[in-house]
Image (cartoon, grey):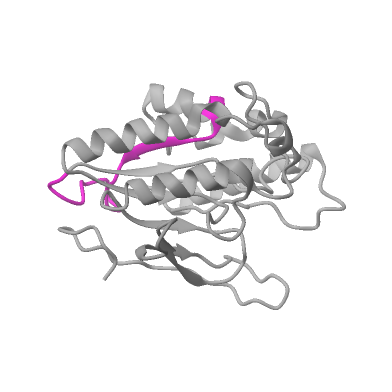
Amino acid sequence: MWGGDSIPHNVDTITLESNVQIMKNISAEVLTHLDGIKIYPTIGNHDTYPQDVIGMAIPKQNKAINEWIDAWDPMITDPATNKLFKDWGYYSMDFEDFTGKKMSAVPAKVFSLNNNICYQFNWETMSVFEDPGNMLSWLEKELTALEEVGGAAIMLSHVPNLDECNRQYGRRYHSIMDRFQHVIRWGMYAHIHKEQFQVQTDMITKKPIGVNFIIGSGTTFQGKPPSFNVVYIDPVTLLPV
């Protein structure tokens, strides 16, 4: 799972052109060195230009993302899924191991969400009070379909939903995590440049209902050491072991 933010954080010197070129370069490197390995990517708040500003009022609203997004075609090969991703920045795919084989007998999916819309420094949030890109409505329908067949879900996004995902979207997203707590096995997030885990709680009683893993950075950042996370998944429960 690729947690996003491939752009260096020297934000005062990054340009639109350098943003696009870096994303193309790092995507090529990842695909070359991880050739044959299943990859689930998600967009980070630095992967656009200017940073943090990711709009979802209309399809393909973000110029920088539009210019590098074709580099991710090898990872998102289904045409309908690829179109949804290029329009809005979110998608779902069957959960498979690193070789592309199904992990379990029950239907299981990874949901990669564009949670940058709820980040506190994304001013697009100020003007989008309804469901941006119909992402939450889509997610609820997808999780309902999994629920009906006894399936399981794993959430992937850049911005953690408990700390940084704010405003109306954050509350609605949290409520979906609450409603489908028996379907969602765990979540994987990034953004904060350090490893930690979060206990997901319900919205009323604060009872623990799940766990989110926050992955560290692949490079050093403000004194924080680089890290590479490996999570082993039980093929029956789809829970980390």
Q: Nearer the viewer, residue 215 or 117?
A: 117
Query: Residue 9: image x %, image y %?
Result: 75, 58
Left/right placement of residue 236 relative to residue 205 reads left
Query: Residue 216: image x %, image y %?
Result: 55, 68
187 within the magenta span: no
Against 56, residue 143 (above or below) is below
Name, please, the residue furthest toward the left. Answer: 105
Q: Residue at x 62, y 29 (%)?
A: 56
Query: Residue 49: image x %, image y %?
Result: 75, 39
Against 225, residue 134 (above or below) is above
Q: Which quadrant would residue 207 be assigned to in this image? A: bottom left
94 within the magenta span: yes
Query: Residue 197: image x %, image y %?
Result: 46, 70
Q: Residue at x 59, y 42 (%)?
A: 168
Against 219, residue 19 (above or below) is above
Against 83, residue 6 (above or below) is below
Q: Residue at x 41, y 30 (%)?
A: 138
Residues rendered magenta in the picture = 86-106
Left/right placement of residue 64 relative to residue 236 reads right
